[in-house]
Image (spheres, grey):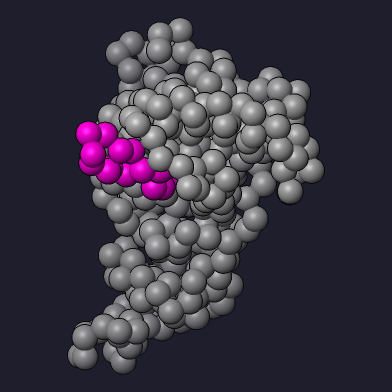
């Protein structure tokens, strides 16, 4: 049995403890509900037993490692009833080398329907096997899906979240710093709570994993609590392997999530519309807070940003929520945040 990656197992466990339903977890992580149920049972057994029970490798596999699905995807069963038998004249996926035979050809309409419904390649593969006796491999489905996805962008939904459920994270360019006659431009990290639009901003010289984790920790302390999920762009500081359907998180980021009891959901690479509010958040900092500014040091820029956040960003009436950001955060969202861990 191909076991789930550790970050997906941790995500199932954390989201379950946060009260998320089996259906919701399956949809957001792009795996079937039976897999979620199995790992929830194993996590429950591990809590009751010493030593902890690891997921067994002897159960029948439903497919290879499932993918993390970016927030914004919807799950639905793909329609269509393609032939169960693979004819000898199977076609190749779009863009493949001439003469290459694809097992996916006869199932193209079914695969397209799955993509239009927002399904992951893993979920499409599982449905093909269980419903249509598909004889090909998961890799062949992934190759086929990549070709289709390149020509037909996947659907997305407007990202509106319940209080305390989600924050979105991204890096952008900060304002110039002039020291000893030399100009350097730092990176600005922006963390935005998706419900209230309460934000946290900090600049760093480099986009390292250590700076990324430090910035997230500072943001959570600033908010006074922890959100259930963090939606990030496929930042090199956080994502070890950038992939359309199977991004692999940096181990240090996974440890951060385990300590704080949150889950990271990477967005689709090269599809900025799938991460929604955070791009606007970075642009808002750049256009409103930093445009035309330069600073004598990195610390001076961070002091300015903290003051700007409190006096400008927090006091504005947001165009979508029609609420003052700070008041909405304090009255509605902050009470819904998870508590910070005892050791920070």
Q: Residue at x 46, y 25 (%)?
A: 303
Q: Is residue 138 left or right of residue 233?
A: left
Q: Compared with residue 49, is residue 283 higher up or lower down, i.e. above or below?
A: below
Q: Compared with residue 309, is residue 174 higher up or lower down, i.e. above or below?
A: below
Q: Residue at x 21, y 91 (%)?
A: 98
Judged by its main secondary structure, the magenta piece is: strand
Camera-nearest residue between 243 and 299: 299
Evaluate whether residue 149 shows in this view: yes
Percent coordinates x, y for residue 77 in the rendering: 57, 63
Camera-nearest residue between 8 and 259: 259
Camera-nearest residue between 36 and 277: 277
Q: Residue at x 71, y 37 (%)?
A: 316
Looking at this rendering, what residue extends furthest in the right direction?
A: 322
Q: Quadrant of residue 216?
A: top left
Q: Compared with residue 311, is residue 340 higher up or lower down, i.e. above or below?
A: above
Percent coordinates x, y for residue 247 in the rendering: 33, 50
Residue range of the region highlighted in magenta in the rendering: 168-185
Rendered-image quadrant of the C terminus: top left
């Amino acid at each position: 049995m191909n076991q789930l990656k550790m970050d997906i197992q941790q995500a199932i466990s954390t989201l379950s403890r946060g009260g998320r339903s089996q259906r919701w977890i399956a949809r957001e992580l792009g795996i079937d509900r039976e897999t979620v149920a199995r790992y929830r049972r194993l996590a429950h057994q591990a809590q009751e037993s010493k030593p902890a029970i690891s997921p067994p490798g002897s159960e029948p596999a439903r497919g290879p490692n499932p993918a993390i699905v970016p927030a914004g995807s919807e799950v639905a069963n793909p329609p269509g009833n393609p032939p169960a038998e693979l004819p000898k004249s199977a076609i190749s996926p779009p863009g493949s080398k001439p003469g290459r035979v694809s097992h996916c050809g006869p199932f193209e309409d079914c695969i397209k329907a799955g993509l239009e419904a927002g399904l992951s390649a893993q979920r499409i593969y599982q449905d093909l096997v269980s419903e249509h006796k598909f004889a090909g491999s998961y890799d062949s489905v992934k190759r086929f899906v990549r070709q289709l996805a390149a020509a037909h962008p996947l659907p997305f939904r407007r990202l509106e979240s319940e209080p305390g459920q989600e924050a979105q994270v991204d890096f952008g360019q900060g304002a110039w710093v002039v020291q000893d006659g030399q100009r350097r431009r730092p990176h600005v990290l922006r963390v935005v709570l998706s419900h209230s639009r309460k934000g946290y901003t900090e600049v760093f010289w480099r986009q390292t994993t250590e700076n990324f984790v430090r910035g997230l920790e500072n943001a959570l302390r600033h908010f006074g609590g922890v959100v259930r999920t963090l939606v990030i762009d496929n930042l090199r500081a956080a994502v070890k392997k950038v992939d359309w359907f199977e991004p692999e998180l940096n181990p240090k980021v996974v440890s951060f999530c385990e300590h704080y009891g949150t889950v990271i959901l990477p967005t689709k690479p090269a599809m900025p519309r799938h991460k929604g509010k955070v791009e606007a958040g970075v642009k808002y900092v750049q256009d409103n807070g930093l445009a035309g500014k330069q600073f004598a040091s990195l610390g001076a820029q961070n002091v300015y940003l903290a003051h700007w956040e409190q006096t400008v960003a927090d006091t504005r009436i947001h165009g979508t929520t029609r609420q003052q950001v700070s008041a909405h955060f304090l009255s509605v969202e902050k009470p819904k945040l998870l508590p910070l861990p005892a050791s920070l």
